[in-house]
Image (cartoon, rainbow, N blue to C red):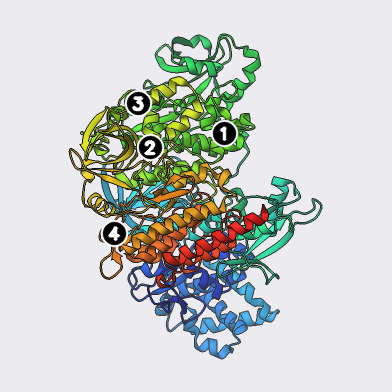
Amino acid sequence: MMDSSISIKVHVAVQATPHEIPVTINTTVEDVIIETSKLLNIGPVARHLFGLRVLSATDDNLWLSPSLFILYAKNEHHIYEYKLRYKMPDVKRLKSIDCYAYNFYFYQVKSDLLKSKVTGLCYDTCKRELIGMGVADMYRSMLEEDKSRETVEQNYKHFMPQEVVKQHMFFLKKPVQETLKILINNNTIGPLYVPVIKESYLEQFNSIAPDYLEEEYKALYSENGSSVNVAFRVNPFHSEMPGIRMCTENRKEWVHLAAIEDLCFLSTTDDGTVEISRKTGIPIHLKFLSTSTMFSFITLLNGYYRLMVNWNFDLCASTNTPSLSKLKSIRSHGPISIMKSTSILKKKMSKKHGSFILRQSMKNYDNYVIDVCVNQSMKPMTYVIESKGGFYKLAGDDKIEYPSIWRLITNNKMSLNFIECIFPSDIAMNELLLCQNTSIKHSIGNDDEDDKITGPHLINSDSIHLLKTICSPKKKMQSLMKVRVATWCKSKRNESTVVVKLFQDDVNINLHLMDLLSLSKRWSSVSSSAIVRLFGLCVDTPTALVSEYFALGPLDTYLRTNKDNILFSNLVEAATYIATALWDMETACLVHGKIRCHKFVVAEHTKNSFIVKLTDPGIHKCYTSHDLYWIPTEFYNTIELARKSPQADIWAFSSTLWELFNYGIILPDVQNVELFKKRFEKNVRMPKPDCCTDDIYHIMTDCWDSDPFIRKKPQATLRDLRQIWLQIYASPQHEYTPLKKEEIYSDDVTCSDATIYYTSDYTIETFLDTVSSSFSGSETKSDFIDFNSNPDDGRSYQNENPMLAATNTSFNQFMEQLTSTEEIKNNLQSAMNCQKKTYQFNNATLTLQQVIGQGFYGVVLEGLLEYSDNKTKKVAVKHMKRSFQTEDFQREIGIIEGLSHPNIVEIEGVLEEPNLMLVMEYIELGSLSSYLRLHEDELVEETNRLLKYSLDIAQGMEYLGSLNIIHRDLATRNILVSSPTTVKISDFGLAQFLPDEKYYYLQTMRDLPLKWHAPEAILYGKFSPKTDIWAYGVLLFEIFSLGKEPNVVSKLEERLDVEKLIRVLEEGHRLQCPSCPPCSIDIYNKLMRPCWAYVAGDRPNFSDLINNIKSLMTLESAEHFTRG
């Protein structure tokens, strides 16, 4: 670790000497800004106007990203400058918000003027104004700093810009003295005149330098396949071109690119390219000479966007604002005022008893405030929460501290009436838009839909000539409308093919006519590149909607029939269009209510593009059980309300993405509705599609969150998808390679699943076969997901379990239970049966049967050993892909072959020909991670049984330690349930024999499960028996929380990164004690917590833990007997 006594120098305008700010390896730039603001008494609201830049003689424009760790900044001298970077359109408002920030701004302006660092200011033209300002500052110095007139007159040059002094050195003193005398004689209020002087000074400055704080950058601008050198400037308040404007080297005129209000999001690549997505127009691509300059530019736009448009949103996914992530993680508003808080409580909850708001303090950086309604006629009660050292307590209560704000709120729920929390929204933060240009109508939170509606065009039915029907029979049953292709004759020489939606023949039009008119009014006003254009409405016979026609047809059908020609890049691009449609609907205050894969049409599919567009929702009958895949859990009891919920659209969007990356798979009807609801309410989610990356699946799970507040917002979803697309492919015109079958399975896989898996006829049976192992024992995103904790488990790889039993957690069984149709069961069994390949194995015949699991490195199959005496034995066979039959697998075999312990999976042997296969005992009950969740209701009162599982694992690990073996991947996903009372350790893919030094350093870069790893393993790749102890403690948390994910860092962080995790651990934060029962405080303090000592030598060994577990089991048995 770096020396904690390292400090950096931060220069400020209000004093000559820099501040010395102590920093560590975990200190971010934003931390430095906050600490400097504290020293200057600048509060939590105004401090967002400030930035930190490198103090350099060559570049004054190198600003640092708030999320950057300060010691990683390329500045060996660690000298920086703290400045107000983001300009407010009315500086007088700053005075009312924060007088200290206002005072700082005055001194900053003065300093930049004196040093002639105000770009764009013509000092010669404005010399009279500058001299007058200098004289005013001289008088301010006399009043505020108690300097004599003689002193300031003697040092008059210190109050004048250098450029003015150079040009008028011999003729300046006398007019200065005369003007100063006039000021003195006219002052009748003495020192009270100081604020007037400062205000006049800044007003005069703004008139002669209106573009102050404008920043200029140079980059390569890409257009039509070529790049040109450009200069561009950012100034949100430029008189003619507010926002971003550009000028090429060959031309002198400036071109307006975008206003800050027009920005959507920013995406970056590692080579210094920024893509600027706008509300209108194609994206802008700029390539910078360095990534540091690129991030300086990004932080400028992001800061202005947060202060002008949406305080609650970061434009760029690759450079987030840490404080904003923290506020989101604890569901707190920013530093809004008590008046704003009261207004929200009144508007949203009518000051309902027990409704409350959590907000950041406007005055104290370490405090939070809760405003709670106790009586509708009274003002809300206000409670202050103080934080120190990672703990929280109510102000005035020195007795009780809590490890989190929400633990405090929960424990005081009844006594302080904390009943229903109002979570932050974008519109709630409008008070914090310090730089908002009030002359531009703001779009966020604008509910006045009528302002945007222009109404549909009325079309004469005689001009429509119907052709063919394009709606499937199944969709016809659900919809009140039928879809026809038609020719629209606008004039004799102007014809076009359109889609016409008419009422079904048996529908009473009068009953639904108003629905049709409302639909046409809402959707004809939408202008989006991702939404099908609605041309108008035929109001005579037949009554119909007329919209764009795209010959390639519905997306789901196109995906199924053209799977072999659709590249992964096509799917990602289509995902961005789906997200665009979602965000454009949110912007237009529209709710679709029927977002599905079949509701999108393919507008274009070429070598370099795959464009899809959303059609209008149409008019449908009531939702059916089949719609449950797209309905969020909170609407299960009031399902029809989902039609009007933007949050339901977000959930449906995620399910549509899932359909997309499964190539338009047809989901079966849900027969057992109650079971389906129960499973999804317990946070079962669809498994990760095989061609889907972890990043994209994380977006799906974020949108499937059971908490509507936590679901990812459409703008953030679109931003992150575009970032993924740009990072992977770098250029929109890049040519891509389709995913090959061989990249997942080698050609000689012995079971027929490989061929079924990739058949072009992608039916539901194939889908069940495909995803069954994704939902078996492996604790990945395709397993059960607890959305009450962080959906990101800290693992950046998909860890395969060595044995995945289909009996408990396989998705095919889950789907069987949901559908309960004999046909699907039979088809599933048919798809799962492998060709009966047999091998000679020791003294038996090994027959490979169905696949029971799969991972990145290969598959796990069920096998049957048949002996000569007709005895049989079921086994599991780990079959590696040929490309991965390397040293890792050989090492795993070498380690596990010599093991013999009742709590370690037994190995039957190794089959080397024709492929390397590991034959193991078959564990019927699957992984412990899934077992805990499936039997949660049963295990919650079975503390001793959970202690027995803990004892089994500790005894197995003690045995491994006696052989100098470290496991390195100890987690419940790698523990198998042999019987309801016995578990066994499995998966030795990361295990290592320890060298003589008793520790092992990681030799190759690989993705590792961070949340289970000790600090020394994360920082240095150093593994020892003590790192297994740390992981064992995390495993205990999984056991006694009944399968919850171990999230030290909150789930609402945008992403888990190493630095953030280490910082949290260094500060002493640990996983909290799970609920009691089944976990007592003794179990937490005696078993879990000691395993997480930051210093490895302070952790216990497995022998100590075994003794502690046995003592706790004895105590628990005695208490259980007493209770009984």
Q: Which mark is residue 992?
A: 4
Q: Is residue 233 visible in this depiction of the protein?
A: yes
Badge 1: residue crowd in 10 Å (few <14, some 14–19, many ≥20): some
In terms of sequence position, does the residue under pointer 2 or pointer 3 come before the other? 2
- In this rendering, which labeled residue sits more in front, label 4 or label 2? 4
Looking at the image, is 1044 positioned above or below residue 11?
above
Amino acid type of disc 4?
Gln
In the drawing, what numbered circle is on residue 831?
3
Does the CB distance between marks 1 and 2 fall below 8 Å? no
Task: Indicate the amino acid at tag 3.
Answer: Ala
**Which of the marked residues, 1 or 4, is nearer the chain's N terminus?**
1
**Residue at 65% from the left image edge and 66% from the top image edge:** 393
Closer to the camera: disc 1 or disc 3?
Answer: 3
Q: 215 or 743, which lies in front?
A: 743
Give the Cα separation between the discs numbered 2 and 3.
Answer: 13 Å
Q: In the picture, which quadrant includes the N terminus?
A: bottom left
For label 2, the crowd category at 10 Å Cα-Cα, with few meaning under 14, some 14 to 19 and many 20 or more, is many
Q: Earlier in the sequence, mark 1 or mark 2?
A: 1
Q: CA distance from mark 1 to mark 4?
A: 44 Å
Q: Secondary structure at mark 3?
A: helix
Determine whether label 4 and label 2 are within 8 Å by CB. Answer: no
